Image (tube, rainbow, N blue to C red):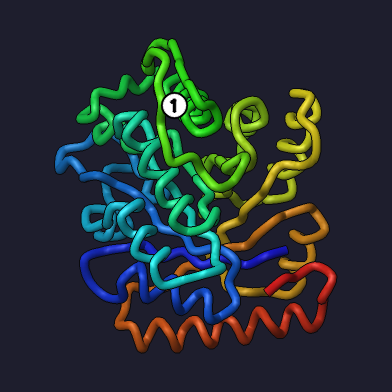
C-alpha cells in the first residue's frame, strides 16, 4: 500500500511545485491537486460536507488550475506520480483537455493519473453549460473520446456531447493505459458506474465505512466482467493509525492520501517530514502492507 499527499492549492502559501518536491523527498508515491474553475456566489447546490450552500474552506474560490500546477510539479520531480483530487473534465473542451493531460504525461515520463469527479457544484457546472442530469453521460463520453485520441494514430468519436472526425493528435501519453479514477461517494450507484467506465475509486472525506464500499466495488467489478482489481485510493482525514491502515491494506486499498497545509514552504516541508516519520513507523510495524 502506497501513501500520497494532496495539496488544496490556492494563491497563497506553498506552491504546487515546492509541495510536490517535498512530497517526493518524503517518500510519497503520488501528489494530488484539486480543481474548481470558479464558485458562483449564489448557489442552490449543497456542499457534501456542510449540507447547504456554505463552503467549508475559502480555498474553493482560490484554487489553482490543476494541469498548470502539475506541469510545474513535473519540472521539479522525477519519480512521484502526478494526479488530481479531483478534476472536473466536463468543464473543459474535451480535445484540448486530452492534449493537456497527454502533454504532462509526456513531459513527466509517464507519471500522470487522472482522478475525476462528477461535480457536486451544479451551479458551477451550469456556467460551463453542463446539464446536471447528464453529467455522468458527459463524463463517460469524455473518458472514451480522450482514450481514442491517446491510443489511436487516427482517432474519431461520435457521441451526444463529444464528436470529432478522423484526427491526428500527438503527443500520446507515455503510459499505454493512463489510469482514470473517479472520486465520489462510495455508494452502489457510483461504484457500479466506476466498474463499467473507470480504473478505480477515490473515497471522499464523508465516506465513513471504507470496507463496505470496497466490497461493493469489488462485487460490481466482478459483475462487470473486469479483470484484475480496481485501484482504490482512500482520503484519510484522521491521521495515520496503524490498525486502520493495516485493515485498509488487507481490504486491498492501493493508496492512502493525506492533506498538506497551504502554509509557507518551510512549514510544509517540516509537516511532510513529521508525517513521513509516522508512516515510516507504520511500514516498520507492517512492511508487507506499506510502500513508503
Q: Residue visible at 78% across and 83% down?
A: 284
Q: Quadrant of the C terminus?
A: bottom right
Q: Can residue 15 be seen in the rendering of this structure?
A: yes
Q: Residue 291 in the image: x percent, y percent?
A: 72, 71
Label count reads 1
Asked where in the image residue 280 lies, by quadrant, the reply is: bottom right
Q: Is residue 111 above or below residue 176?
A: below
Apparent side of residue 206 relative to residue 247 in the rendered image (left or right): left
Q: Nearer the viewer, residue 195 or 106?
A: 106
Question: Which of the pair 56/163 is nearer the observer?
Answer: 163
Q: Is residue 167 above or below residue 292?
A: above
Q: Residue furthest left?
A: 41
Residue 168 position, x and y percent, is 41, 26
Residue 84 visible to an observer of this rendering: no
The quarter of the rendered structure image containing the N terminus is bottom right
Name the residue located 37 percent from the left edge and 49 percent from the top edge.
50
Q: Residue at x 49, y 64 (%)?
A: 31
Q: Is residue 119 above or below residue 174?
A: above
Regarding mark 1 in the picture, which secondary structure is present there? helix
Give x and y (percent) for residue 227. 80, 33
Is residue 47 depicted above or below 262 in this figure?
A: above
Residue carrying label 1: 142
Query: Residue at position x 31%, y 75% from top?
Result: 14
Amino acid at each position: 500500500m502506497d501513501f500520497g499527499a494532496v495539496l488544496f492549492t490556492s494563491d497563497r502559501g506553498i506552491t504546487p511545485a515546492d509541495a510536490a518536491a517535498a512530497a517526493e523527498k518524503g517518500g510519497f508515491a503520488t501528489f494530488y491537486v484539486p480543481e474548481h474553475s470558479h464558485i458562483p456566489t449564489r448557489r442552490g447546490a449543497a456542499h457534501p460536507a456542510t449540507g447547504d450552500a456554505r463552503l467549508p474552506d475559502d480555498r474553493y474560490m482560490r484554487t489553482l488550475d490543476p494541469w498548470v500546477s502539475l506541469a510545474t510539479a513535473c519540472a521539479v520531480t522525477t519519480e512521484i506520480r502526478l494526479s488530481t483530487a479531483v478534476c472536473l473534465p466536463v468543464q473543459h473542451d474535451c480535445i484540448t483537455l486530452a492534449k493537456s493531460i497527454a502533454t504532462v504525461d509526456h513531459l513527466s515520463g509517464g507519471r500522470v493519473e487522472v482522478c475525476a469527479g462528477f461535480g457536486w457544484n451544479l451551479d458551477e457546472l451550469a456556467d460551463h453549460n453542463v446539464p446536471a442530469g447528464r453529467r455522468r453521460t458527459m463524463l463517460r463520453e469524455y473518458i472514451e473520446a480522450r482514450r481514442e485520441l491517446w491510443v489511436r494514430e487516427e482517432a474519431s468519436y461520435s457521441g451526444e456531447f463529444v464528436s470529432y472526425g478522423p484526427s491526428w493528435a500527438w503527443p500520446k501519453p507515455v503510459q499505454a493505459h493512463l489510469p482514470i479514477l473517479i472520486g465520489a461517494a462510495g455508494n452502489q450507484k457510483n461504484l457500479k458506474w466506476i466498474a463499467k467506465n473507470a480504473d478505480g475509486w477515490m473515497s471522499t472525506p464523508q465516506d465513513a465505512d471504507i470496507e463496505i464500499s470496497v466490497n461493493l466495488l469489488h462485487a460490481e467489478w466482478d459483475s462487470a466482467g473486469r479483470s484484475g482489481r480496481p485501484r482504490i485510493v482512500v482520503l484519510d482525514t484522521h491521521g495515520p493509525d496503524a490498525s486502520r491502515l493495516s485493515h485498509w491494506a488487507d481490504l486491498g486499498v492501493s493508496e492512502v492520501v493525506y492533506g498538506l497545509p497551504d502554509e509557507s514552504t518551510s512549514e510544509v516541508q517540516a509537516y511532510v517530514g513529521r508525517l513521513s516519520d509516522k508512516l515510516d513507523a507504520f511500514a516498520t510495524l507492517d512492511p508487507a502492507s506499506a510502500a513508503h
